[in-house]
Image (cartoon, rainbow, N blue to C red):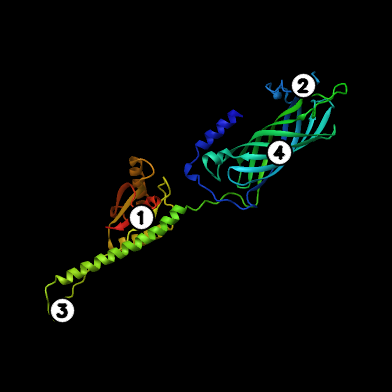
Amino acid sequence: MLAIAGLSMNAMAQEDPTLKYSVATNSFWSNWFIQANVNYSASWAGTDKIFQNPFYKFPLGTALTDVDHDTRTALGFSLAIGKWFTPGLGLRTKATGIWMGKAFNSDIDKYLAVNENVLFNLSNMFCGYNENRIWNFIPYLGAGVARNFDAKANTFLVNAGILNTFRLSKKLAANLELGYTSYGEAFGAPAHDGIAPKHRMNQFSVEVGLTYNLGKTGWSKTPDVDAIKALSQGQIDALNAQLSDAQAENARLKNMLANQPKQTAAAVVAAPQTITKVVAAPVSVFFNLGKSTVASKKDLQNVSDLAKVAKDNNSKLVVTGYADSKTGSADYNQKLSQKRAEAVANELVKLGVSRDQIETVAAGGVNTLSPITYNRRATVEIK
């Protein structure tokens, strides 16, 4: 079990971290699954044998001479239905049928166990949800009831184990499950001289099978509230910047007219003066915490409009990257702001702007906008 756990964590650590993201709560009818497995187990009575490997007699499993510590192998099957309530937490109802025998002897008991398991997907808990992950490492705990049909006896049980699932497709996965079950006292062990044994029956099992996902599967990405707020704030900033630029241009023209030499009306008509200036408000592109990939592709629509203006007028564009000063060191924020500026510059190149027309600036960590999350952005403006 420890070896499989180590391999699972190693495989998860090598996955692309950009594929991990937070998810929204799903509906009750989403993320249900069914499982079917073949079960192979070894059982024994008593606690003094618990640290001995019960699988050493596989596949033939001859009984021990001490009836109170009888070790027997078994073939069986299991069926289960369950649901994931979050990517890391689920419930499963499982029924297991076992034909408990003594190898080729004729002494065979038939059992049925029904238990409820709480599933913990540690892959998603510690490494983030990734719908394309190949290997999911899922420990579980549970309890239930069991019946020995031959002895006509019922008992409770507790169990624990590790479920490993291997993704085959969006709907289908292969299972490898290792489990331990402890049954109630004297359940399932053969009587000796009419006296029932006093020891619990313990069981280790290995199961292989398939999981089929029912209906809607997977989890939707949680909307980045900060990015949405920042986008709205960015639009307000753009309008304010546009208004400020228009006011500045209006003041400049008034000043120019006030300082012009007086001319006759005929001279003004004969020699009109044309003033051409491209005025465009800065455009903001926002990013998530610690990321240099654009949070919302909608931001690029405004960048596209600005890129067209720059191409039509052969203007230069300045891309300035920012990070919020409250998160990370100054050196880290300087590098992150440069990456954000470069990311937006690359988008401009894709839109047809020559690289020679683009200047990138890394402003590092700043605290110019409120809340601080609005500073996770890059601005594009005409120089």
Q: Which mark is residue 37?
A: 4
- Does residue 133 lie above or below 222 as drawn? above
Q: Residue flagged by tag 1: what amino acid is it?
A: Leu
- State the image quarter where residue 54 is shown: top right
- What percent of the width, then of the height, locates residue 328? 38, 41
Q: Which mark is residue 348?
A: 1
Q: CA distance from mark 3 to mark 4?
A: 95 Å
- What percent of the width, then of the height, locates residue 288? 43, 49
Count of numbered marks: 4
Secondary structure under tag 4 reads strand
Q: Residue flagged by tag 2: what amino acid is it?
A: His
The N terminus lies in quadrant: top right
Q: Residue flagged by tag 3: what amino acid is it?
A: Ala
Q: CA distance from mark 4 to mark 1?
A: 54 Å
Residue identified by numbered label 3 = 270
Tell which tag, 4 or 2, sits nearer the viewer.
Answer: 2
Q: Which mark is residue 69?
A: 2
* Residue drawn at point x = 17 percent, y = 79 percent: 269
